[in-house]
Amino acid sequence: SQQGEEDPQALSIQEGENATMNCSYKTSINNLQWYRQNSGRGLVHLILIRSNEREKHSGRLRVTLDTSKKSSSLLITASRAADTASYFCGGSGGSNYKLTFGKGTLLTVNP
Amino acid sequence: EAGVTQFPSHSVIEKGQTVTLRCDPISGHDNLYWYRRVMGKEIKFLLHFVKESKQDESGMPNNRFLAERTGGTYSTLKVQPAELEDSGVYFCASSQGGTASRVYTFGSGTRLTVV
């Protein structure tokens, strides 16, 4: 079953604006992670939020988690052209730490 | 620290041929995962190794796919015979054991095109 489902599928903004991406999941999780993928490259880990946490910050990134709604959001503040990438959320609910991803959000930041 | 290495980066083969993808995880990482992304769709889990053992292979599409991890080091994923629907980007990821298992390091992927 698909654990992470990102929304919107594509987002285009101007440099300096904030970008918000959402993620919904279906089953219980221990943690939820966000990854970024630049074209032609592998996924890069951005941030992990545990199921008992509600909000987490890392630099220009802010992640929230609402376990009652089974949803998470990723906010990128003061976006830069270099933030252009696909963003994926992945949920992990099992003891083997298997991550289940969605289709991703393609973010384009225009200079 | 060297990252996760995958090769080839691209492969174009004809339907019915065999292809073998290779993944070299970060040294010392017990966990190795294979994922696949078909264009426009989600990144789908294929299987998980802990050292040389298959922990979870529930995502393997069918018996045309065979994964191995010799001596708990590098891993190969063989597709034989390849079909058109096998086209996509195959990602490998590794993570440490224990509580550090949560965060994956991904390779750049192998883009497989079956024609």
Image (cartoon, rainbow, N blue to C red):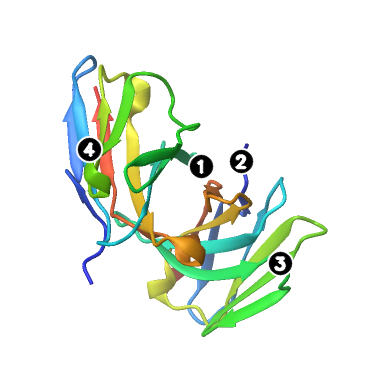
**Disc 4 marks which residue?**
B21
Do the numbered discs 2 and 1 sit on residues whose CB atoms are within 8 Å? yes
Q: Secondary structure beneath disc 3? A: strand
Q: Quadrant of residue B28?
A: bottom left
Amino acid type at mark 4:
Leu
How many angstroms separate mark 2 from mark 3 (CA)?
18 Å
Return the x and y of residue A55 as percentages of the image width and height: 69, 76
Amino acid type at mark 2:
Gln
User: Is B18 rendered above or below residue B37?
Assistant: above
Q: Is residue B11 left or right of residue A106?
A: left
Chain at numbered mark 1: B
User: Is B92 rendered above or below residue A75?
Assistant: above
Amino acid type at mark 1:
Glu
The quadrant the C terminus of chain B occupies is top left
How many angstroms separate mark 3 from mark 1 (CA)?
21 Å
Q: Residue at x 61, y 49 (%)?
A: A94
Q: Badge 3: few (under 14), some or many (20 or more) residues near its Cα, within 10 Å?
A: many
Chain at numbered mark 2: A
Residue A8 or residue B90, whichever sits in front:
B90
User: Is B29 rendered above or below residue A16?
Assistant: above
**Disc 3 marks which residue?**
A65
